[in-house]
Image (tube, rainbow, N blue to C red):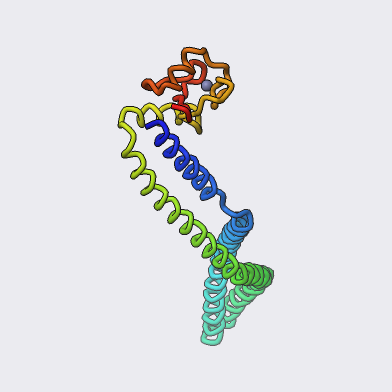
């Protein structure tokens, strides 16, 4: 039964190795994902900046429109004025609106230039992302294939393990699993020719070695607690 258990363990070790391998994402993919995410984050920030600026420009444009309306209306009122005093008042108003219009136009100009620069920045980042995406997708596809083939091996090993484990008593299997978990690796180890524990190398007491070699029940290493078995048993 311990022989079978050691075969179960061989499969468990292989499964452990596969799990480790599965978790090791290729560095090229890790790098590419990081570059992609950084670009997306940067693009998000730049777009938010651009939108903020667009909002300001939009507000300026509404204000400009309203000033133009008011200037036009003052000019019309000046033409319709019945006295020259009234006409001069409307002309003054028109002049004030014209001055404010000019100021606002001057203030808006740099915003428009800034908008152009920011749009170019956003476009450049979008282009970088467009170039990067197919590279990332190719690496992701490779990764899916890699993981899939590992999963297939894990599945077939799992089937084999279940089959083998049926030849081991539930109690022994449970003990083995507990020790293996506690010891992170080996749960059942052979007694060496020299009478030491194949797990922790401690010299085993003679009676322990004899018990194991006779195949009498389940014996644990007094030092590391691993289940001991002997090829001579
Ligand atoms: Zn030991």
Q: Position of residue 223 (x, y in %)?
A: 52, 17
Q: Which quarter of the picture shows residue 177? A: top left
Q: Is residue 18 left or right of residue 215?
A: right
Q: Position of residue 27 (x, y in %)?
A: 63, 54
Is residue 176 shown above or below 80?
above
The residue positioned 33% from the left and 37% from the top of the image is: 167
Is residue 173 shown above or below 53?
above
Question: How many numbered discs, if any?
Answer: 0
The residue positioned 53% from the left and 85% from the top of the image is: 76
Q: Position of residue 182 (x, y in %)?
A: 46, 27
Residue 115 visible in rendering: no
Q: Which quarter of the picture shows residue 9? A: top left
Depth order, front residue of 135/87: 135
Figure quadrant of the N terminus: top left
The residue positioned 52% from the left and 24% from the top of the image is: 191
The residue positioned 38% from the left and 20% from the top of the image is: 216
Depth order, front residue of 64/85: 64
Q: Is residue 149 left or right of residue 130?
A: left
Q: Is residue 162 left or right of residue 129?
A: left
Residue 146 visible in rendering: yes
Depth order, front residue of 183/167: 167
Q: Position of residue 95 (x, y in %)?
A: 63, 76
Depth order, front residue of 83/150: 150
Is residue 58 shown above or below 24?
below
Is residue 107 shown above or below 69?
above
């Amino acid at each position: 039964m311990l022989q079978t258990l050691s075969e179960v363990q061989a499969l468990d070790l292989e499964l452990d190795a596969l799990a480790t391998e599965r978790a090791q994402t290729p560095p090229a993919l890790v790098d590419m994902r990081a570059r992609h995410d950084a670009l997306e984050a940067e693009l998000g920030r730049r777009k938010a900046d651009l939108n903020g600026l667009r909002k300001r420009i939009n507000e300026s444009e509404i204000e400009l429109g309203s000033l133009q309306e008011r200037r036009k209306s003052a000019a019309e009122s000046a033409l319709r004025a019945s006295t020259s005093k009234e006409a001069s008042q409307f002309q003054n108003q028109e002049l004030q609106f014209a001055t404010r219009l000019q100021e606002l136009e001057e203030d808006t100009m740099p915003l428009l230039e800034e908008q152009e620069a920011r749009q170019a920045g956003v476009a450049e980042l979008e282009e970088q992302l467009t170039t990067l995406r197919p590279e990332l997708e190719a690496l992701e596809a490779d990764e899916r294939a890699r993981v899939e083939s590992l999963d297939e091996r894990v599945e077939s090993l799992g089937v084999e393990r279940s089959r083998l484990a049926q030849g081991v008593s539930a109690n022994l299997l449970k003990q083995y699993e507990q020790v293996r978990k506690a010891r992170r690796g080996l749960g059942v180890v052979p007694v060496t020719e020299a009478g030491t524990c194949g797990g922790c190398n401690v010299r085993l007491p003679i009676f322990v070695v004899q018990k194991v070699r006779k195949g009498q029940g389940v014996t644990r290493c007094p030092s590391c607690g691993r289940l001991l078995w002997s090829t001579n048993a």
